[in-house]
Amino acid sequence: MNKELFSNDEYREALEMLNQLMRDVEQISDADHKVLFYNVLQYFDSIHREPVLRIMKALESYPALKKEISEDETVQKLCTLYDIKTEEHPTKKEKVMDLIPVEELTYITPPKQKDWLELGNYQEFEDKKLYAKNYERVNFLVSRVGSEVFAVQNQCDGSLLPIDKGTLEDHFLICPWHGCKYDLKTGHSVNVNDKKLDTFQVEIEEDGLLKVEIAY
């Protein structure tokens, strides 16, 4: 069996370091890098969460072993991180870090909150240019077409790949990776069946202030 990598104290220090790195990421100003980081992190979270869930489920047939494993401090923190119950009547859980709790995985759970995001005067957005944005870990893009402004998810349906490097033909967005052609007005693909982008409500106030309603 492999040697343990950390003591409990070192494990806590590693979690705190990861917490600090997450806080540093929040300060990244480059939208492309921030969007890519969150996409990677969301799927990194999911591919680890699923096997941990299966392991804990399999241990239900071995209650003594499950109890012994669950009492390990690092296992407790991992299960808390992934929102996994390790006992029938758990006490209030310690928050071990800020790494994308399961309720915030927007591609797994339905939106629970909505916020209006102010993006400045809409005339400052160049015509037929795609602007990548991120808010509350929701990756979306904004585009002005004439006097209209559209906001849709910055991710080709069924893929992790952002599409803000795509091309615009009138109000149609063409994915640079797969060639899917999306109508920005509805989010629906016009050349690939059953593909659709999430759309976000846009409002332009009398003074030109552009606001986008983000669900997360």
Image (cartoon, rainbow, N blue to C red):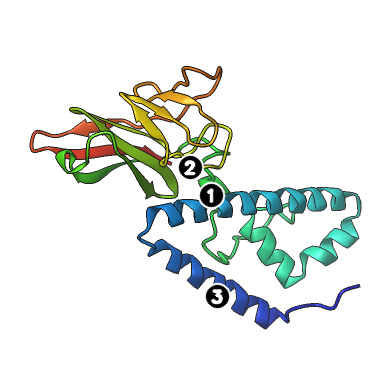
| Label whose residue precedes the other's in the sequence (1 or 3) | 3
User: Picture coordinates of residue 148 (x, y %)?
Assistant: 22, 27
Camera-side residue of 207 and 15: 207
Q: Is residue 80 above or below residue 42?
A: below
Q: Quadrant of residue 170?
A: top left
Q: Earlier in the sequence, mark 2 or mark 3?
A: 3
> Horizontally, is 133 left or right of 82 in the view?
left
**Separation (CA) of disc 2 from disc 3:** 28 Å
Q: Position of residue 157 (x, y in %)?
A: 53, 31
> Which amino acid type is shown beneath numbered disc 2?
Pro
- In the rendered image, residue 109, in percent from the top left (x then y), is placed at 55, 38
Left or right? Give the position of 132 relative to 95.
left
Sequence order check, earlier mark of 1 and 2:
1
Instruction: Tell me, for residue 162, which label it has, or none.
Output: 2
68 on left or right of 138: right
Give the residue at x 23% y 39%.
211
Q: Nearer the viewer, mark 1 or mark 3?
A: 1
Q: Secondary structure at mark 2?
A: loop
Disc 1 to disc 2: CB gap under 8 Å: yes
Nearer to me, 181 or 118: 181
- Crowd band around label 3 with a 10 angstrom C-alpha radius: few (<14), some (14–19), many (20+): few
Query: Which residue: 80% across, 77% down?
Result: 4
- Return the residue at label 3: 17
Above or below: residue 62 compared with residue 10: above
Quadrant the C terminus occupies:
top left
Residue picked out by circle 1 = 39
**Amino acid type, mark 3:** Met
Q: Residue 196's x, y, as percent?
A: 49, 25
Mark 1 Cα within 10 Å, few/some/many (few <14, many 20+)?
Answer: some
